[in-house]
């Protein structure tokens, strides 16, 4: 396990170093070189991993028995089909999917927030991306789409988000939210409303109402109403959940500061609300953990605008240090708690092994 800690923390360290160099690059060639280094630091360990990630075995199985791939989204289906027609080894599915996950993140994030975005990407999303492969590709494309919409490139943003849905249909949950970015929120009403909504989700029979609705039962996801993913989630101390909620609630508390710089950042606020509610849903039923994973990208996307919304450099530094320390603690906990087991479960990212040990 020591080697696993060294590998994952080295990824975090070197991504931090090169992303800092991107922000402070004096020329486009320097920025491009540093971005490329960030990409390879993220890409190589993911591409050469062996048996890492809960769904690794499942994807390998589907690749070897393509009949099972027919239920998957069209983008992933044809990606796998091309590799099979080339008689490529099963490991290539993890090479190509890793490329699709990390390339957009590394090359489309704005330079102004590059350091914070990439550091928090590693802290909050990199380890889960080893497990939720198709959804991670979709999230990467969604991030690009959201960035384009915030920059008023609406058609391009919608197109990229539609492309994300060809790898995982959960992207369709995000697309309608784009049209809510015109809504202005007042913090004095927003925070109590989110807290009240969270309370109602926990205490009302919302989950059973959803699982028994005709819309859900007639969908392709109706199997989740009866399998292990419909079970009540197990909560230990709850500290991990509370730490996970610190950043999104901080965003809501200071949302007026954030949206003052760019009115389109209202979309970030909408996505943050959805992320909080998804986490609360996941506390009740396990399958909603995937919905929380879908919206988790807002954590690394909004952290830059949040911190830079403070005019005082000292305040920015204090907030940044606090958030980094909190998320480093969660990062270490995830490495420890998500070990590979025969039964599966968790992220299955420890201990790290490569294809060279096959």
Image: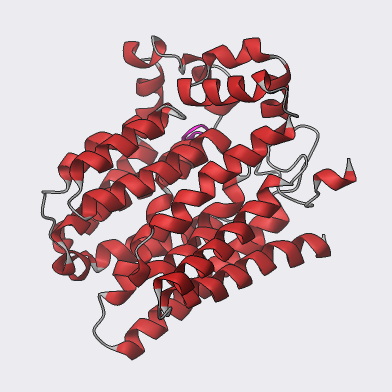
Pick whichever, 159 or 339, lies toward us. Answer: 159
Q: Nearer the viewer, residue 237 or 19?
A: 19
In-image side of 358 versus 330 (left or right): right
Looking at the picture, the colour scheme in use is secondary structure
Q: Residue at x 60, y 62 (%)?
A: 331
Q: Position of residue 89 (x, y in %)?
A: 75, 29
Residue drawn at point x = 71 percent, y = 48 percent: 349
Please provide percent x and percent y for residue 26: 40, 81
- The part of the image, by quadrant, that contains residue 132 is top right
**Does the segment drawn in magenta span residue 286?**
yes
**Residue 344 visible at all:** no
> Is 105 included in the stretch rendered in magenta?
no
User: Residue placed at 30% from the left, 69% from the top?
Assistant: 306
Whole-percent x, y for residue 256 in the image: 17, 67
Q: Residue 186 location in percent, x, y?
A: 12, 60
Report the predominant secondary structure element of the magenta stretch: loop
Magenta extent: 285-289
Q: Residue furthest right?
A: 357
| Placement of the C terminus among the 4 image quadrants | top right
Res. 204 visible in picture:
yes
**Left or right side of 347 for 122:** left
Work out which quarter of the rendered image holds the N terminus and state it.
bottom right
Residue 172, quarter of picture = top left
How many numbered marks, from 0 up?
0
Whether residue 110 is situated above or below residue 298 in the rendered picture: below
């Amino acid at each position: 396990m020591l080697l696993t800690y060294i590998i994952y923390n080295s990824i975090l360290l070197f991504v931090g170093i090169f992303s800092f160099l991107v922000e402070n690059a004096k020329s486009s060639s320097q920025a491009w070189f540093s971005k490329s280094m960030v990409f390879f630091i993220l890409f190589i360990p993911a591409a050469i991993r062996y048996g890492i990630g809960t769904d690794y075995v499942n994807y390998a199985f589907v690749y070897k028995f393509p009949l099972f791939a027919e239920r998957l989204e069209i983008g992933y289906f044809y990606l796998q089909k091309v590799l099979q027609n080339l008689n490529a080894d099963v490991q290539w599915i993890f090479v190509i999917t890793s490329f699709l996950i990390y390339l957009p993140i590394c090359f489309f994030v704005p330079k102004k927030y590059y350091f914070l975005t990439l550091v928090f990407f590693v802290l909050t999303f990199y380890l889960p991306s080893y497990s939720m492969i198709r959804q991670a590709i979709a999230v990467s494309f969604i991030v690009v789409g959201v960035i384009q919409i915030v920059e008023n490139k609406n058609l391009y943003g919608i197109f990229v988000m539609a492309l994300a849905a060809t790898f995982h249909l959960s992207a369709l949950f995000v697309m309608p939210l784009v049209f809510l970015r015109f809504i202005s929120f007042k913090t004095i009403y927003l925070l109590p409303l989110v807290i009240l909504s969270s309370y109602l989700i926990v205490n009302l029979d919302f989950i059973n109402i959803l699982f028994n609705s005709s819309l859900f039962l007639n969908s392709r996801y109706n199997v989740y109403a009866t399998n292990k993913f419909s079970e009540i989630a197990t909560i230990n101390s709850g500290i991990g959940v509370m730490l996970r909620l610190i950043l999104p609630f901080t965003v809501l508390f200071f949302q007026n500061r954030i949206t003052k710089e760019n009115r389109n950042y209202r979309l970030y606020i909408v996505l943050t609300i959805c992320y909080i509610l998804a986490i609360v849903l996941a506390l009740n039923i396990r399958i909603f953990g995937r919905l929380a994973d879908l919206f988790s990208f807002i954590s690394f996307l909004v952290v830059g605008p949040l911190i830079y919304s403070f005019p005082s450099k000292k305040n920015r530094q204090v907030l940044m240090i606090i958030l980094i320390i909190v998320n480093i603690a969660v990062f270490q906990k995830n490495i420890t708690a998500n070990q590979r087991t025969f039964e599966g479960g968790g992220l299955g990212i420890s201990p790290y092994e490569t294809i060279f040990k096959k």
